[in-house]
Amino acid sequence: MVFNAFQGFILAGLVSVRFSLAQGSVASLDVKNSTVLLRGSTPRRWPLGDEDMAFPSEYRFSIHDFHSVLTSEASETFGIHRLSGSKSNELWLNAIEYEWGKLQTRRRLGTNTSVTLSPYLVCDIEEGKVGEKCHSSVESHFGPGMATIYNGYDKSCYIVSATYQVAESAPSYLVVTPLVVEGKIREGVLDEIDSRDALKGLQLIFCPGLGLDEESAKNKVTSIIDGFYEREDNKGRLLSNDSLNLQISHRFLRTDALESTRHEEMQQFWKRKLQDGIEAGLCDEFHNNIEVEIDDFDDGFTVMVPPEFQTMEFRECMHSLVAGFSLSESICSIETKPEFYALNSVAQWVTQSDQQDNRPFFDVGLDGDGEVVQVSDTGLDLDNCYFNDALNGNIAKNGRVDLTKRKVVQYVAYADSREGRSGHGTHVAGTVGGKREGANGIVDGIAPRSKIAFFDIEVTGRPSLSAPNNPSTYFNEGRSASAKIHSASWGTGFNGYSFSERAFDNYMAVYDDFLVIVSAGNSGERGAGTVGSPSTCKNGLSVGSTQNARPHITDSMRGEDYLSGFSSRGPTRDGRAKPDIMAPGHYIRSAEAREDFIGECDDTNPDALTYKSGTSMAAPVVSGTAALVRQYFQEAWYPGGRKGSGVRMNPSSALTKAVLLNGGQTLTAIQNRNGSISSSTQYDFNQRFGRINLIESLPLAGKNSINAIIVDRKSLSNNQEDTYDISIREAECRGPLTTTLVWTDPPAASGCTNCLINDLDLTVDGPGGRIYPNGRSSADTLNNAERIRIDDPVNNRSYRVTVRGANLDRSSQDYSLVVTGCFANPDEESTPQTPSPIRTPNPTPPPEPAPTGGQQQSPSVPIPSPSTCEDGKGTVQVNSVIGEKDCMWLESNKNDYPWLCSFRDVSLECPVACDVCDVFEEDSSEEVGETEIYGVQPSGQSRWHGNMFEVDFLQNIVITEFLLHIRGAGNERRVQIYMIDGAFTGKEFTASSWGNPIVDQQVASEGFGQLTSVNTNISVNGGEKKSFYFTIAGTIEDMVIINGSPAGNVIVQNEDMRIKWGKAISYPFGGTSSQSFDGYGLNGGFQYALRNGSNGCTDSSDAFYVDNVVGDQDCDWVSRNTYRFDHVCKFLAVAIKCPVTCDFCGIKRDD
């Protein structure tokens, strides 16, 4: 929403409480050299009695500490680069003393401090705490609604909004300091205002915890600007015009401070700017005419300056505006509004196979069909034959969507509806998905069967682009046209993390299947640190440029294995590695725009095609390739490499990104503009993951022989590890073993110095030891994309891929993983090694023996079976950003999240909202009896990681609890239980044969001699044999089992089940057949109930329609595929047809 901030309001100004720190202050302060905060230090807090000074006698948060977590104008203000450490720190501490004194004085004057919120920087430096624990400790004192700005291994820091009383009473392990005005102004803002020819506005972020919606955010901004012109002082007396305009200056310059609080040059700079601006009374009209647009997530806004006020004479008014906003306790970040610029079909085979004229994905029909790619650029010449639709007519340029159009299905004329002579947008869109009408074209795009949703962001003739202030403005338009990929061939030279990057990351975190692909920039000749905004965001894909391949290169060019000299280089300002991936962008031929010609095409006009160079040309190459990746998963090509060989899936943007990065090939070197060669190596800041090569990323039957493991949206908690075992088999292929981990990280703070919020670790353990990602010798703690490539894995040897939650700010993080190489198919056997069992002393007899073979009565089993069609009062998980919402929210938002109701748990909770009442009815034919316990009493002596055994089920039952014998009373243990059909022989050590655990819970152990209960709800039919693997995650050997007869013999049995002896197996599935520890059995049992009658809970024997890709399948097919695709049974339609396979007994479909 855009509004004039002054419309309908009386101009009035800022009330300032005037005070002097001379009264009740310490006259001098002993300032020591700066001390960096480290977890484990013991900071001293400030005594806060009525007569006490507001500043501590010993302080541990220096200007260098502040600068280490947040970049801002504070570094210039306090002379961090120009003064000695002690002098700059003295100025900083004086300013902090002033701010605390102001807060304390306001308390003493009785100003409404019990409800007045002020922003503070809070750091938890307690040793040994991961980010989640730090977040929790800060939240427990300050409450929810804080912003994480730094989550490292030394400290975790946050911006909070709190009252003075809450801030001053924080526990000693939290270091708290007011957020000074200079700390709110992002680094470089002052230079931008003074150096730009035309400054278009500011972008600001509200302080956290204010609970603003769009309307209250608009009112908040209006009141802040209104406050610049308050007409009364704090005693209600009218101010003269001269006094009026001094209020901002007085507060911002701290004119009543006894000690210097700024570097003298900066103090004089601000005096001049404010004297020539707001104090001179020249800014009233300027402030009256600015407009404000609240962003779509209501946590920030853009201040827009009309063109007539963008001239030199109003620069001081812009400085005054920055000063005024910084004084607001509702504003925590201020930066300039960026100006974006355009960053000016051989590429098909280069990206698909890197073999001349070999397009394996086109050969099998993967050409972008069914995918829509959104392009934001200068304009699009619709009558060019690569976009024209003679049959249906070209799309109207009014933003409406028409998916029946041949090529362009949407045109949003945001800036204008023209494509100028530059033809930048036409060239870019042609590279993504251009397709000559009625014939094969000379320059058909990377995804020629895809369709284009276009967003025009250039007013023809203007030097810079007119991109929306809120990125969601164009992303939402693309989503409305079914686009899940956005191609942006434009940017700025800014190298940091700002309002724009934060907005990009936030959008991709909320809409986790939407991937933004951005050109890195064309400033590579200037060296390192030239990659530009917004490609410096974390969750998007930043694209650099290689040269093209012959014949589309000049005589002096080396070819596609060389990085273009102009391609911008990393790192970002906070040290992250960008760009992510390379693609041909140097001398790319594509469609040309000709306003003076209708229907230009290959053979009708010599100017219908044109060559262009730049990362602008590389980004659409990657965008088109991403469309092929999405088509691959949408049409169920995984895992068999054939269409329909798996289950159709909507890949997350993290998975699409991981696939693109996984196959990247190392470039030889950099060829500079003058022809000279510069070195570049894999993972460096020049080429990162190398040039895209899709044939190395995905199995494709008949085109390559690699296998793949694909994991998407897998949740991981702090210190949790997921492992994947790989056995190399080079009988049919040879090549590297490559694994790539990507996760969608939460948005960071503008100006962050360590922008990664959640840190995951990827490692591979093999014959040569442990390997770390991205060419490093230790964990990568900066980036949310990690890859390990082993060029020559050892044949017939095993490798273990591990993903670990290393340091998460919150309780969990979803990730995506791709593993490719010449390894055994997950269906094949593999046999790793296991250690000898560890013996423990004889156990102390339990106070009361557990039941063994008997029955114990307990309430009926809670089988989900809604007898009435009502929405529940619980919540459903939308995603990691939006979190849990109730059915009322779903009812209002289901058009934006239509996929939610396809999940059975959501439909069960919200059947009315999901409109599925007709498929549920009470299952009257299925009666469930009382629960009973059966198994073996806790008398074992062998201590182990886990136990694998078989059970023959003789009746239809529902298992409601698993009972395990776990040592260490009160200890939290992560119990994982796996279950497969039939015997486990030959599958003891093959994780892929078991799929995901049916139970994965943190439980508190009851201790030695007692049974520990693990809740579940699993239906099993009589006559079935099931194999179970009970294990404790990690290296904890606390499961107690018994030693006895060989595997397969019966331990105990009753009329309902036979529990058999099994084997001792390490976590997870570790061991070899040569060290098979036979004859170990369950020391525990099951709590279960009989199901009388089976008609209400049987799998359909008929084939049923799944979708237009898989076609008709039966429940046997579902059963065979669930271990690979654990999400299949989460879908309501599948669960209803296959309730036994999907453990959905108790819900009956309405035939």
Image (spheres, rainbow, N blue to C red):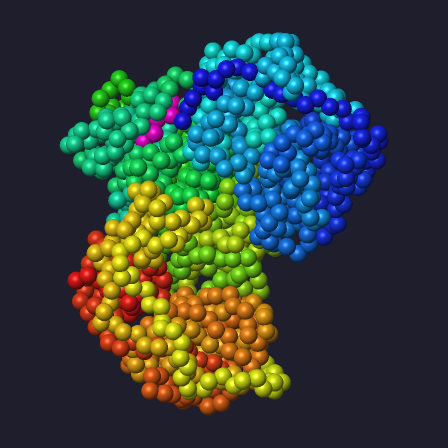
Lateral position of residue 219 relative to residue 776, left or right: left
Specify whether residue 755 is painted magenta. Answer: no
Establish if 1110 lies above or below 862: above
| Total number of numbered discs in the rendering | 0
Residue 440 versus residue 243: which sits nearer the camera? Answer: 243
Establish if 1065 lies above or below 79: below
The residue drawn where x is 68% and y is 30% is: 110
Lateral position of residue 219 relative to residue 280, left or right: left
Residue 1028, position as x, y percentages in the image: 41, 76
Establish if 530 lies above or below 1025: above
Specify whether residue 455 is painted magenta. Answer: yes
The residue drawn where x is 49% and y is 77% is: 964
Q: Quadrant of the N terminus?
A: top left
Q: Quadrant of the C terminus?
A: bottom left
Question: Magenta stretch?
Answer: 454-458
Residue 133, position as x, y percentages in the image: 60, 53
> Would residue 105 be visible to someone looking at this image?
yes
The residue drawn where x is 68% and y is 52% is: 126
Magenta segment's dominant SS is strand
Residue 849 versus residue 384: which sits nearer the camera? Answer: 849
> Would residue 1069 be visible to someone looking at this image?
no
Where residue 1023 sits, quadrant-wise, is bottom left
Lateral position of residue 264 relative to residue 522, left or right: right
Residue 788, position as x, y percentages in the image: 51, 55
Residue 1085 versus residue 41: which sits nearer the camera? Answer: 1085
The residue drawn where x is 22% and y is 22% is: 598
Lateral position of residue 1104 relative to residue 841, left or right: left
Establish if 208 lies above or below 1023: above
Residue 1146, position as x, y percentages in the image: 28, 67
